[in-house]
Image (cartoon, rainbow, N blue to C red):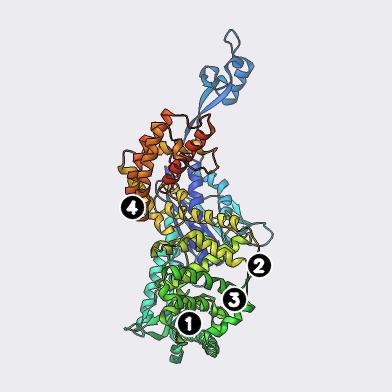
């Protein structure tokens, strides 16, 4: 039979950006526990939440564990029975312990011989008993960015727990967590329904939440937020800017939303739009409004957690707070405008970027040098714009506005550069060099912004690797993985023919003035780090691991070519009948070369056997065409061409001893295999395939 499961953890207000991840983690933990305990779930568990509660609902959970038949192994047969076949004390003791007769014994073969065995039916325990034991640990195991301890209970959670509602088919699941005993009591809205509520079951709970002014379903609450914001905006003929991040934040800040429209002095509209929107969004969680042509209105919408008794009083309160914020922003803006943006470059000499990597000014000089290198090769006609954008890209960090609103870094640089009269592409690049802000986010739209962004990130990654602050499996405090993925995505999107090795080399040379390190070692670590990031990205795109490894191990210098190489190798694997045989041939070559790490040169006069001569002749004919096709990015055609080497290589292995006794012949044949291996590796490392 199935039962209804209801778990509600009532807390003090949970940070809005913690709520959804915490609920998902709780669901995973409970699902895993039920699965491990053989408790069937016919319908997916549901999760709901508000700032004051985490809710998990199971509408169809088995009321007990599934019965199973276990095979229990006892003593060895020779110890269980004497020579006449009579049971010994060992056999009788085993039977009594398992509650069976000796007649129920079976015998099983094991690596250690024949043993006594029985099949024992294990009756499932009630689900309520299992959950009573497991739930405190599951609640304790929910991961949070930061947790709290309170009182003397020695328990940590995202916020102090005030009540726990835990029911299975209306019956309390008894346990204690964080000093709070579970029960059948919940609570409504803190202000509009503060009374305790006795809950008899799932439907009773859902009804009483509605009556208690609590919308537990986050999707429903978001729709209500949108509706109330839109209705409030219509009172001034405005359209709200439905920023997804702000919408999610507001939804997770309230249990029962209601909106009010307020206004501010129209003179504040002279501030740059990003300043106004940020002041409303970041500090006050207000929605900005636009008119029918998209211009900002001197109005906003605030979402409250209660129905307002006197809307005028609430409106005035919101207006008074926002007016103070906008007055501050206006002051900062006017103060910042007293100096040109470029004048602030000198201020960066007083800002420590990182104790061992120097000042922000020093970082800017390194970025300029690296950006110039990139521009010379891919955008020479814009090198002056690149140089200018790189020089200005961090100057807004020392402005009053960014000091007050850090989220506006780059944005204010763009706005101040525009006001100072710089070319639009330079202004755009100052902002866009920070893009993408997170995985999957939008890339820069301007090539200048792409170049400055690559230079900035490569300097960051190289610098932290040079001083030994590389990411670990548990932590990446400087977001180096995100920076690496951004560089990879930009190079792929722009299809720029840039050597990754050279990029790392120049970046590390720039660091020589600030820190000492072993350049080759750091370069190798940075290269491995980028390869790992690329592989992770390719795996998420659906490519097989060995396919990715075959391409990345062969060549990781020109990142913009990698996806095409992977696609064409995959096509070759599917369409060519020669793929497996070719991979095996390459493995024969690499097996010989494993212990031959000394580079050797082929002496054509020592190619005495016909099979050697045929192989070298085919190699010489094909080599140029394969390199030409690779240069044209026609890897599929090059792979088909290299299959012509398979038969001559196999004949060589069949007809001569590669590691001949004559050292001259041995070295010459090994040298020939080295040249062949290099040619194969110019396309793919076939040893990565498990064939």
Q: Nearer the viewer, residue 491 or 599?
A: 599
Residue position for label 4: 634
Of callouts 2 and 3, the N-terminal one? 2
Q: Which mark is residue 110?
A: none
Query: How far, Cα to Cα, is label 3 from label 1?
Result: 26 Å
Of callouts 1 and 4, the N-terminal one? 1
Query: Residue 345, position in %: x, y?
Result: 57, 81
Q: Nearer the viewer, residue 138 or 18?
A: 18
Of callouts 1 and 2, the N-terminal one? 1
Residue at image coords 46%, 89%? 268
Residue position for label 1: 275
Q: Residues within 10 Å of mark 3 (few under 14, many from 20)?
A: many
| Position of the C terminus by quadrant | top left
Of callouts 4 and 2, the N-terminal one? 2
Residue position for label 2: 356
Q: Is residue 253 visible?
A: no
Query: How far, Cα to Cα, is label 1 from label 2?
Result: 34 Å
Q: Residues within 10 Å of mark 2 (few under 14, many from 20)?
A: some
Query: Residue 160, position in %: x, y?
Result: 60, 63
């Amino acid at each position: 039979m199935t039962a209804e499961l209801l778990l509600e953890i009532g807390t003090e207000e949970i940070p809005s950006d913690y709520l959804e991840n915490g609920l998902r983690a709780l669901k995973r933990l409970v699902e895993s526990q039920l699965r491990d305990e053989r408790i069937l779930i016919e319908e997916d568990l549901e999760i709901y939440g508000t700032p004051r509660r985490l809710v998990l609902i199971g509408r169809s959970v088995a009321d007990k564990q599934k019965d199973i038949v276990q095979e229990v192994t006892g003593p060895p047969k020779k110890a269980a029975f004497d020579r006449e076949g009579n049971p010994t004390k060992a056999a009788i003791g085993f039977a009594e312990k398992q509650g069976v007769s000796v007649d129920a014994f079976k015998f099983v073969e094991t690596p250690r011989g024949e043993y006594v065995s029985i099949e024992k039916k294990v009756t499932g325990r009630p689900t309520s008993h299992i959950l009573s034991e497991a739930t405190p640990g599951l609640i304790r195991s929910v991961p949070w960015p930061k947790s709290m301890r309170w009182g003397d209970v020695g328990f940590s959670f995202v916020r102090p727990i005030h009540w726990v509602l835990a029911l299975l088919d209306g019956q309390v699941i008894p346990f204690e967590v964080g000093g709070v005993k579970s029960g059948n009591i919940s609570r409504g809205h803190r202000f509009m329904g503060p009374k305790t509520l006795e809950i008899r079951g799932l439907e009773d709970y859902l009804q009483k939440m509605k009556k208690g002014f609590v919308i537990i379903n986050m999707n429903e609450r978001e729709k209500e937020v949108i509706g109330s914001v839109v209705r409030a905006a219509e009172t001034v003929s405005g359209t709200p800017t439905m920023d997804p991040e702000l919408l999610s934040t507001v939804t997770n800040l309230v249990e029962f939303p209601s909106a009010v429209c307020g206004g501010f002095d129209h003179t504040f509209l002279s501030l740059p739009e990003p300043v106004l929107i940020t002041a409303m969004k970041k500090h006050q969680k207000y929605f900005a409004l636009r008119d029918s042509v998209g211009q900002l209105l001197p109005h906003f919408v605030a979402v409250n957690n209660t129905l307002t008794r006197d809307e005028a009083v609430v409106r005035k309160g919101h207006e008074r707070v926002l007016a103070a914020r906008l007055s501050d922003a206006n002051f900062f803006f006017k103060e910042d405008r007293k100096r040109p943006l470029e004048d602030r470059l000198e201020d960066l000499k007083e800002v420590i970027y990182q104790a061992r990597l120097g000042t922000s000014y020093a970082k800017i000089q390194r970025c300029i040098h690296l950006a110039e290198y990139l521009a010379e090769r891919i955008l020479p006609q814009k090198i002056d714009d690149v140089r200018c954008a790189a020089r200005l890209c961090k100057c807004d960090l020392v402005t009053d506005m960014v000091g007050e609103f850090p989220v506006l870094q780059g944005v204010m640089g763009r706005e101040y550069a525009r006001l100072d009269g710089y070319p639009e592409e330079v202004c755009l690049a100052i902002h866009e060099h920070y893009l993408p802000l997170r995985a999957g986010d939008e890339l820069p739209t301007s090539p200048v912004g792409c170049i400055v962004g690559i230079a900035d990130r490569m300097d960051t990654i190289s610098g932290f690797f040079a001083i030994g602050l590389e990411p670990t499996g548990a932590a990446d405090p400087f977001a180096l993985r995100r920076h690496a993925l951004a560089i990879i995505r930009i190079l792929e999107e722009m299809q720029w023919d840039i050597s990754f090795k050279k990029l790392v080399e120049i970046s590390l040379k720039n660091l020589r003035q600030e820190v000492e390190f072993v350049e080759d070692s750091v370069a190798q670590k940075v290269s491995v780090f980028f390869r790992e990031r690329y592989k992770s990205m390719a795996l998420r795109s659906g490519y097989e691991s060995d396919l990715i490894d075959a391409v990345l191990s062969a060549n990781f210098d020109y990142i913009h070519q990698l996806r095409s190489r992977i696609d064409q190798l995959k096509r070759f694997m599917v369409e060519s009948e020669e793929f497996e045989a070719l991979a095996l041939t390459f493995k024969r070559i690499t097996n010989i070369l494993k212990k031959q790490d000394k580079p050797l040169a082929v002496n054509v006069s020592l190619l005495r056997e016909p099979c050697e001569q045929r192989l070298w002749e085919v190699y010489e004919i094909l080599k140029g065409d394969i390199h030409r096709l690779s240069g044209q990015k026609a890897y599929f055609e090059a792979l088909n061409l290299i299959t012509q080497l398979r038969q001559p290589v196999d004949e060589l292995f069949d007809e001569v001893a590669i590691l001949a006794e004559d050292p001259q012949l041995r070295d010459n044949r090994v040298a020939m295999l080295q040249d062949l291996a290099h040619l194969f590796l110019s396309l793919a490392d076939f040893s990565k395939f498990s064939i």
